[in-house]
Image: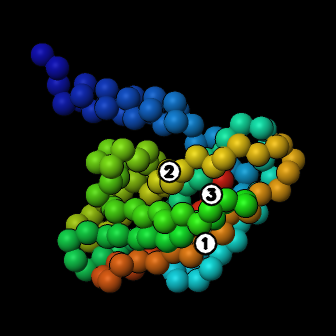
Amino acid sequence: MRTPIYWTTVTFLMALGCSGLMGYGEEIASADVQSGERFKLDYTPTTDAPHQLWIDTKLSWTGSEGHIKGKLKVGKGELMDVDFDHDEAPMGGGRVTLNTVETTRGMSGTVWVMELPASAAGESVTVQGKWTGDKGTTIEKLRFVVTD
C-alpha cells in the first residue's frame, strides 16, 4: 500500500520533471513592471532558437479570483492581448508555473507566458506593453523575465 509520503514524493518528482522539460533556462533579461504603466524590456538572444517569456508575480484580490491582463508587442510583431487568471495555475489553464503559492485571496509564483519568436543570436529584441489588474486585483509584484 502506498502512503501519502509516497504520493507526495511522486508528485514532487513529476513537477520537477515537468519544469525541467519546459525549461526555465537561464535568465537573459528582466524588467520590473508597475501596474498600468508602459514597460520596455530589451534582450539579446543567445541562440537562434525561440526564447521564453515568464512573469514573476505576486497578486492579491478581494473577489473570488485574481486576474491580470495586458498587451504585449515582441520586436516588430503585432500587439497581442494576453491575460492570466490565477486559477490557470498550475494546471487548470495548461500554463506551467514554478514556486507557486496560493491562498484564498492571493498568489505568488513564476508563470510561463509565451514562447518568443526566434530571432538571430546577437540581434536585440524588444518586448513592450502595459499590464493591469482587473477590479479587485492588486499587482504587488510583476517582473517579466526572458529565458533561453
Quarter where residue 34 is shown = bottom right
Q: Position of residue 142 (x, y in %)?
A: 53, 70
Q: Kindly identify the residue that appears in the image at 57 percent across and 37 percent down.
A: 23
Say left or right for 122 vs 40. Answer: right
Q: Residues within 10 Å of mark 1 (few under 14, many from 20)?
A: many
- The amino acid marked with disc number 3 is Val
Q: Nearer the viewer, mark 1 or mark 3?
A: 1
Quadrant in which the C terminus appears: top right
Q: Which mark is residue 112?
A: 2
Amino acid type assigned to the residue bearing label 1 in the image: Gly
Vertical comparison of 72 with 92: above or below: below
Return the residue at label 3.
145
Left or right of residue 66, residue 4 in this image: left
**Left or right of residue 60: residue 21:** right
Q: Nearer the viewer, residue 12 or 29?
A: 29
In the rendered structure, find residue 129 and report the number of the disc placed on it: 1
The picture places residue 69, in percent across and down from the top left corner, at 44, 70
Q: Mark yes or no: residue 47 visible.
A: yes
At label 2, counting other C-alpha atoms closer than 10 Å, the crowd grade (few under 14, some 14-19, many 20 or more) is: many
Q: Amino acid at mark 2?
A: Trp
In the rendered image, residue 134, in percent from the top left (x then y), is placed at: 36, 78
Mark 2–mark 1 Cα distance, whole angstroms, equals: 17 Å
Tell me the distance, in whole angstroms, between the alpha carbons under discs 3 and 2. Answer: 9 Å
User: Could you say whether the residue bearing mark 1 is in a helix, strand or loop?
Assistant: strand
